[in-house]
Image (cartoon, grey):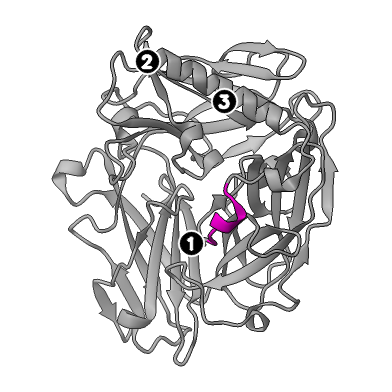
């Protein structure tokens, strides 16, 4: 009975949140966190609950949906800019500014001054904004093309309101690389026999024949990322073998330092249209003020045989099926997720994916309904196609456990990136001198 009451209250909370955002007349009331409690972070983070659908991707001026699936990565001196997009629920424009910060390998801010990595003053006004058209929930859509930078490396952009740099709205990571070294990946089954059927091992070689590295053991740092996630990236790998005459660094390990769980192919739903039921959508309820999409009830996939399925490797695209103008005409839909477990599990259950940067918060926390044996949550999402997983968190201190519900298989198709950092002699910051993106099916 207590669980049912919690479920009911969560639904009321979502409806209240939507109503509270229409319209926004006082920007000081929109903060998810009081201004005094907003602490700058170099992680991807949204500070205000009425900010939704944050995207940062290379704007090739081609297929926008394909661009959205790309990570926030760009080549140094590349003419294709990175494009920031986000929505603010309501119908009032806010005066938003962008600042950009250079960071080291560990995502701590570097010692570089603004003038060392930017050509312009580090305060950019977002001038491109439009009000949504013909949507039940109005919103203002903002977009901003990032300026070019003078140096490769890790970067974080911060959006703040007006002239107050402490009134933060969101932060977003991106990287700029300048390939000075060559990276050759080799994906293999795990060297640990106990994990060979469920892990993927990333071996690789770095060649620096045309680039000077005085002390590779100290000067070179490497990061490996799976499916564009920073939270589970592998860092601080040291080369197992240095071939000085051939200018080669070998990264092959036998203690699982370079292992990722293979996981499973992502679950997916499609609610680009509210006129018919898209993939994995069981029901649509359309009122004058809100659209509710109830997804098919999911089952745990752990223990089942691996099945190859097409996915976006955890990402999502925004789209309006009927008009093709998703950024301004896609509505925000109360999307209901359900996972049938039959009984409670010894921890918390969340819905995660690229749509929420894999973060755990009250919005994607699931509540167990004892009458149906189902975990349930409702999340406000813009019309589109979304990948997602169910994640288990045994305790507040433990990391999320995705294989708990989804299973893990070495055959799974995953996206990987290897990022190589170097701090030159006398340098004051880590620079990205190598970047390699590859698919697990391509590197075998």
Q: What element carries label 1?
A: strand
Q: Residue 436 bears which disc, if any?
A: 1
Q: Earlier in the sequence, mark 2 or mark 3?
A: 2
User: 110 or 270, which lies in front?
Assistant: 110
In the image, taking residue 118 as reference, residue 375 lies left or right, namely left
Q: Tag 2: Cα neighbours inside 10 Å, few (<14), some, or many (≥20)?
A: few
Determine the residue positioned at 27% across, 39% down.
395
State the image coordinates of residue 212 (x, y, percent, origin top left): 44, 87
User: 419 or 85, which lies in front?
Assistant: 85
The Cα atoms of the two marked residues, 2 and 3, are separated by: 17 Å
Quadrant housing residue 258: bottom left
Q: Is the magenta stretch mostly helix, strand or loop?
A: loop
Vertical side of 331 occupied by 258: above or below? below
Q: Name the residue under label 2.
A: 2
Q: Tag 3: Cα neighbours inside 10 Å, few (<14), some, or many (≥20)?
A: few
Q: What stretch is highlighted in magenta?
A: 33-40
Q: Which of marks 1 and 2 is nearer the N terminus?
A: 2
Farthest left residue?
Answer: 193
Q: Is mark 2 on a helix, strand or loop?
A: helix
State the image coordinates of residue 299 (x, y, percent, origin top left): 37, 18
Determine the residue positioned at 34% across, 41% down.
400
Q: Judge whether residue 36 is colored magenta.
A: yes
């Amino acid at each position: 009975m207590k669980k049912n009451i919690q479920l009911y209250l969560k639904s009321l909370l979502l409806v209240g949140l939507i109503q509270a955002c229409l319209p926004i007349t006082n920007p000081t009331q929109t903060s998810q966190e009081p201004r005094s409690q907003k602490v700058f972070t170099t992680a991807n983070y949204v500070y205000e609950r009425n900010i939704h659908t944050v995207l940062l991707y290379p704007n090739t001026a081609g297929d926008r949906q394909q661009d959205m699936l790309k990570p926030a990565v760009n080549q140094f001196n590349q003419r294709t800019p990175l494009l920031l997009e986000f929505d603010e629920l309501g119908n009032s424009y806010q005066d938003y500014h962008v600042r950009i910060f250079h960071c080291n390998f560990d995502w701590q801010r570097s010692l570089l001054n603004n003038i060392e990595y930017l050509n312009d003053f580090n305060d950019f006004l977002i001038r491109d904004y439009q009000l949504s058209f013909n949507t039940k929930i109005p919103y203002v859509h903002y977009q901003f093309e990032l300026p070019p930078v003078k140096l490769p490396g890790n970067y974080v952009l911060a959006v703040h309101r007006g002239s107050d740099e402490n009134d933060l709205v969101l932060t977003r990571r991106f990287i700029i690389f300048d390939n000075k070294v060559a990276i050759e990946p080799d994906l293999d089954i795990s060297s640990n026999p106990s994990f060979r059927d469920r892990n993927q091992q990333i071996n690789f070689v770095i060649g620096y024949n045309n680039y000077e590295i005085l002390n590779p053991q100290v000067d070179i740092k490497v990061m490996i990322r799976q499916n564009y996630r920073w939270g589970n990236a592998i860092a601080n790998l040291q080369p197992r073998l240095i071939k000085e005459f051939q200018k080669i660094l070998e990264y092959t390990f036998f203690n699982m330092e370079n292992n990722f769980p293979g996981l499973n192919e992502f679950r997916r739903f499609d609610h680009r249209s509210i006129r018919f039921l898209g993939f994995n959508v069981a029901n649509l309820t359309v009122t004058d003020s809100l659209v509710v999409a109830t997804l098919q009830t999911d089952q745990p996939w752990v223990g089942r045989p691996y099945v190859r399925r097409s996915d976006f490797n955890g990402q999502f695209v925004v789209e309006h099926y009927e008009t093709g103008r998703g950024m301004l005409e896609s509505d925000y839909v109360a999307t209901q997720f359900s996972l049938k477990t039959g009984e409670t599990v010894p921890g918390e259950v969340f819905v995660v994916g690229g749509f929420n940067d894999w973060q755990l918060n009250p919005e994607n926390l699931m509540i167990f309904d004892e009458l149906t044996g189902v975990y349930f949550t409702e999340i406000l999402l813009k019309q589109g196609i979304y990948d997602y997983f169910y994640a288990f968190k045994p305790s507040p201190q433990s990391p999320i456990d995705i294989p708990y519900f989804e299973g893990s298989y070495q055959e799974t198709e995953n996206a990987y990136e290897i990022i190589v950092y170097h701090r030159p002699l006398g340098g004051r910051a880590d620079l990205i001198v190598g970047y390699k993106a590859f698919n697990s099916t391509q590197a075998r």
